[in-house]
Amino acid sequence: MANNLNRNWQGTSLAVEAKIDGVSKTKYTHCDVTSWKSLSAFFKGVFERNGRIDVVVANAGIVERKEFLDDILTPDGELAEPDLSVINVNLTGCMLTGKLALWYFKKNPTPGGALVMISSVGGYMDGLVPFKES
């Protein structure tokens, strides 16, 4: 059985316990999917502990916290920079995860692996501009 190393964007452990011969093989590791440095350290750590990575599931996703098209102003009355965290997590995080997965699949003793990228039905709903674009 493979190790299940699940994490979410805000660092809450979502790990499902995996046991091999009755011994827990689950390890929670905090990882920021929007950060190349954080993600690459995560993948490197998993590869060093296990000697291979066989399956990666890119499933991080968040929804908008504020309406993207609303005009939000700074204290001095200027238009504030839009919050792009939805794009950073849902799109960039998925792309970075995929890039690292493919790299480590090539490094496996027998090259190969399975990459699963999950989308959301929310992309088909009205509104949710950054969410749909990601």
Image (cartoon, rainbow, N blue to C red):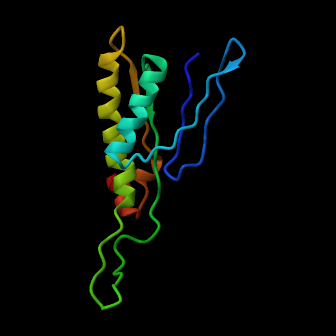
Residue 44 in view of the camera: yes
Say which of 42 and 113 sits in front.
Answer: 42
**Drawn side of residue 116 relative to residue 36, left or right:** right
Residue sitting nearer the eye, 97 or 68: 97
Is residue 90 rendered to the left or right of residue 27? left
The residue drawn where x is 33% and y is 48% is: 91
Q: Quadrant of residue 75?
A: bottom left
Q: Nearer the viewer, residue 33 or 29?
A: 29
Res 55 visible: no
Q: Residue 9: horizontal and vertical position, in percent?
A: 49, 50
Residue drawn where x is 32% and y is 40% of the image: 96
* Residue 64 drawn above or below residue 12: below
Residue 34 point in image, percent of width and height: 37, 49
Q: 63 above or below 72?
A: above
Q: Position of residue 20 (x, y in %)?
A: 65, 15
- Image quadrant of residue 56? top left
Q: At 61% from the left edge and 28% from the top edge, which residue is drawn?
A: 26
Q: Which residue is at a point 32% across and 12% down the rendered structure image?
A: 111
Number of numbered callouts drawn: 0
Outermost residue toward the left in this view? 78
Residue at the limit of the structure toward the bottom, as seen here:
76
Residue with the most extreme right position? 22
On the image, the x and y values in percent for residue 94 come to: 36, 41
Q: Quadrant of the N terminus?
A: top right
Residue 33 picture quarter: top left
